[in-house]
Image (cartoon, rainbow, N blue to C red):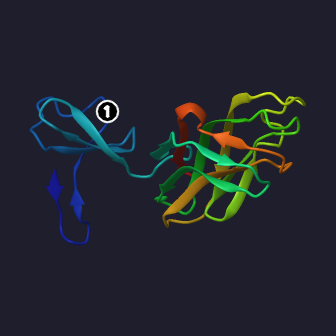
Amino acid sequence: MAINNLASGFRPGVCTSSTRPTTPYEGQMIYETDTDMVAIWNGSAWRYIAATTPTNGTVLQVVTGETSTLVSNATSTYADTGLTATITPKSSSSKIAVMVSQPGGKTNENAENRLQVKLMRGSTDLITSGDLIGYTATAIFNIGTVSMFYLDSPATTSATTYKTQFRNPNNTATVRVQYGGGTSTIVLMEIAG
């Protein structure tokens, strides 16, 4: 390692991944020109600490959320499911990959009963599941899982909350999410863009 004058700043050892020091000391820092990564020797292994410039498509962070609390809705007005997660993007050019798995179903109160789920960023609607989840055209109880994937471009570095809401679009009877203690999950992955 070298510390040059103030104009050039701090400079770690420079090498490639195949020419790293053979007898490093604990805390030694290197920059690998072939991987574009900075690594520190922890006493037993080299540990990468950051990419100097993330390559497009690199996963920068992952945030998850889950809930297993039963929520019911017997109207055509969207209600919160209780499933939410918040991520603070590192760059305004990043994309957020959102993955949702949410168990839900309809009661046996009405033949037209069905479940619709939507994904939101803050108060902005992003995508809906369609309105035939659980539909059987008969008054039988039906349980299933709604899965969603959405690649969002929020264009911000502020904390951003994603959540799901649900309803019965026909306003005929009760629909539920997290029925029987089933766990709903949401995964947010910041992707360098």
Residue situated furthest bottom in the rendering: 7
Residue marked by disc 1:
17
Q: Is residue 184 above or below residue 75?
A: above
Q: Please name the amino acid that badge 1 sits on.
A: Ser
Task: Tell me if I can see residue 182 in this picture.
Answer: no
Q: Residue at x 52, y 45 (%)?
A: 189
Where residue 45 sits: x, y (%)?
20, 30
- Residue 98 percent location from the top left of the image: 60, 45
Q: On the rendered structure, is 44 left or right of 121?
A: left
Q: Quadrant of residue 41?
A: top left
Percent across and percent down for residue 68 are 51, 39
Query: Is 92 located above or below residue 170 in the figure?
Result: below
Residue 76: x, y in percent? 80, 54
Residue at 74% from the left image edge and 35% from the top image edge: 107
Q: How many marks?
A: 1
Q: Quarter of the image holding residue 36? A: top left
What is the residue that sits farthest to the front in this orientation? 109
Apparent side of residue 53 relative to residue 73 in the rendered image (left or right): left
**SS under mark 1:** loop
Q: Nearer the viewer, residue 46 or 33?
A: 46
Q: Residue at x 13, y 44 (%)?
A: 27
Whether residue 52 is visible: yes
Q: Left or right? Give the position of 89 relative to 72.
A: left
Name the residue located 81 percent from the left edge and 43 percent from the top edge. Answer: 130
Graded by Cα atoms within 10 Å as few (under 14), some (14 to 19) or many (20 or more), the crowding at tag 1 reads some
Q: Is residue 73 left or right of residue 20?
A: right
